[in-house]
Structures are given as C-alpha cells and as structure tokens.
Image (cartoon, rainbow, N blue to C red):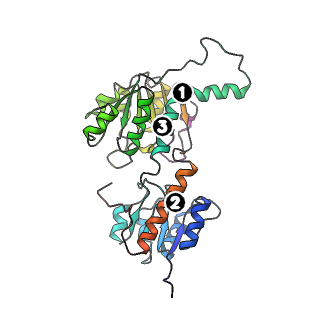
Amino acid sequence: MPAQRLSVVVTRRLPEVVETRMKELFDVELRDPDTKMTREELAAAMRRADVLVPCVTDQIDASLLAQAGEKLKLIANYGAGIDHIDIASARQRGVLVSNTPGVVTEDTADMTIALMLAVTRRIPEGLALMQSGKWEGWAPTAMMGGRIGGKRLGILGMGRIGQAVARRARAFGMQIHYHNRKRVRPEIEEELEATYWESLDQMVSRMDIVSVNCPHTPSTFHLLNARRLKLMKPSAVIVNTSRGEVIDENALTRGLRAGEIAGAGLDVFEHGHEINPRLRELQNVVLLPHMGSATVEGRVEMGEKVIINIKTFADGHRPPDQVVPGVM
C-alpha cells in the first residue's frame, strides 16, 4: 500500500513545470488565480496543510502561526529571504522552515550592475525621450552620464550576492570596497582586490556607488539612515536589490530631491509596493518592481529547491535548506 502523500498548499502561482512536478509528488493545492492570500486564507491553509509553500508577499508572524493547527509541520519558503516569517515562533510550535539559498545570486548580481548602468548612464531618461518622439538627433552635450570604470564601489553585505556583484564590477574596472558583519576570508579579498571597512560611516562617505546587498534583520533596519545618507558624496549613487527596509526611504527621497545624492536605482522598497510618491517623480531615480531574481531559470531552480526540501522532509530527513534561528 503506498504511503500517504503530504498535503501541500502553495500560496501563489509558480512556474508551470514546478507546479506539475509538485502535483506528481504531493497532494498539492495550487493557487488560482494568482492573487495574494488574505490573512484568513493563510490561517486556513496552515490548518489543513502538512506543508505550506509561501513567498515574500506572505507575512507569517507569531499571531498567524498561533492560528495554525497541529497538522502543519513544514513551511517550505519559495525564496531565499525569510524576514517575512517568524522563525522563532515557528520553531516553538514544532514547525520547520526551509528556504532556497543561492538560487538568486547570479540573477540579482546582474540586476545590480544593470541598475548601476541605468542610473549613471541615464538610460530611462533616454528611453522616455525616444518614446516621447521629441528627440532631435545627436548632440555633443546631450544626455551625458558618467562611466562606472574606475569608480569606487562600496558593497554593504559581502555574502554570496555581494561577492557576485564584486566579480562583475571588477570586470567593469571598478575598485571594490565593502562593509560586512564579519570580514571575509583573505583569499576572497585577494581575488576581488577588495578593501574592508570596519566603519560603515567611513566607507559610505568615500564611495562613488553604494550597493545594498545585505538581508533585512533587526540590526540592518534603516542601516542607511538619514545621518549616514548625508555622509554620501553629492556625486554618489545608491543601488538596492536586497531589502527596502535597509534604507530610510523618506530620508533617501529628501536627499535625492535636495541634490545631496546624485541618483538611486531601487528594485525593493521599504513598504513593499507602496512607494513614496515623491520618489516616483524624480528623474535621477530608476525604480523596478522587485524583479532582481525574475528569470525563468532562477524561478524554476527555486521551485526545484522547494521540492527537494519537501521531499527530503517527507522521507523523514532534515530539509537540506532548513533555516535555524540565530544562524541567519
């Protein structure tokens, strides 16, 4: 007699190939249409599922976990970031949490470089000019931006993604600087020709471009606050493809409007999709809809990791990407 299959609830639409494989392996409920679950829907899903597969749009806090039944045993997050899940509360209830680390590294690093180029070379402004039909031809002083070769790049967070950004930036001839909770190994510093700054204040005041690549934790919330943003050179650019909460968005908007910061490229925002309207109006800002990891290849790999985590758990073993409180 075949073993009973795990009941799995998926909170958003996933790539078709991932959903099909899940259907083959588990007793899965797929989300249709692709809308965000309400808190009531999430609570109900957690009561009837052995495994919940949420993503970054699902806020799973202590009060929501308190509504989960005894059935829920694993939250297999679709994505690497897990700041939307209360890991400690889940652990107290005997619920394991897994994520999908490493999958988004290359895609997010690509987007980081793309945003640097978009801001410094004024690509959206050029695109808007062409689409308006008002372009009157080439001129020697028109649409002049800056080059990134030879510029100092300050990377805030030298994990997988930060290092991938550094490798790409080196190919563009940039000088690599970084601030991290811990200094990286000497061989990595040597490979990247990276300069470590223990003081974030000292680093940001000297950089031409600052790239945010650290996770959102209580210690990184508003790490780039109004005081630190004022330390940046008026010619400097800031890029964020990590988490919006790391930057004080209102202070950043004020700095950009006042000309205290030259430009910004943002793929993430402090309040999710609710973006400061004054930020939208600025020409020296490039805004993207959280698409840093949005490649077909990356999203399929992410789904494959979720499936491996669930399948390993179903076989009675610890999920390979289990998240442990205090190790994040």
For badge 3, the amino acid type reads Thr
Q: Nearer the viewer, residue 181 or 113?
A: 113
Whether the residues at callouts 1 and 3 have beta carbons within 8 Å, the answer is no
- The quadrant holding residue 36 is bottom right
Which labelled disc corresponds to residue 63?
A: none
Q: Which residue is mark 2?
A: 303
Whether the residues at callouts 2 and 1 have beta carbons within 8 Å, the answer is no
Farthest residue to the right: give it: 133
Q: Position of residue 15 (x, y in %)?
A: 59, 58
The residue drawn where x is 50% and y is 56% is 302
Q: Nearer the viewer, mark 1 or mark 3?
A: 3
Say few, some or many: other residues with alpha carbon within 10 Å of mark 1 (under 14 / 14 to 19 / 20 or more): many
Q: CA distance from mark 1 to mark 3?
A: 16 Å
The residue drawn where x is 42% and y is 66% is 63
Q: Position of residue 319 (x, y in %)?
A: 39, 66
Q: Is residue 109 magenta?
A: no
User: Relative to 95, is 267 on the left or the right?
Assistant: right
The residue drawn where x is 46% and y is 51% is 103
Q: CA distance from mark 3 to mark 2?
A: 23 Å
Q: Is residue 304 above or below residue 175?
A: below
Q: Nearer the viewer, mark 3 or mark 2?
A: 2
Q: Nearer the viewer, residue 66 or 240?
A: 240
Q: Which residue is mark 3?
A: 112
Q: Is residue 271 magenta?
A: yes
For marks 1 and 3, the one nearer the N-term is 3
Whether residue 269 is visible to the viewer of this picture, yes or no, is: no
Indicate the secondary structure of the residue bearing disc 2: helix
Q: Which residue is mark 1?
A: 284
Q: CA distance from mark 2 to mark 1?
A: 36 Å
The stretch in magenta equals 267-284
Indicate the secondary structure of the residue bearing disc 3: helix
For badge 2, the amino acid type reads Gly
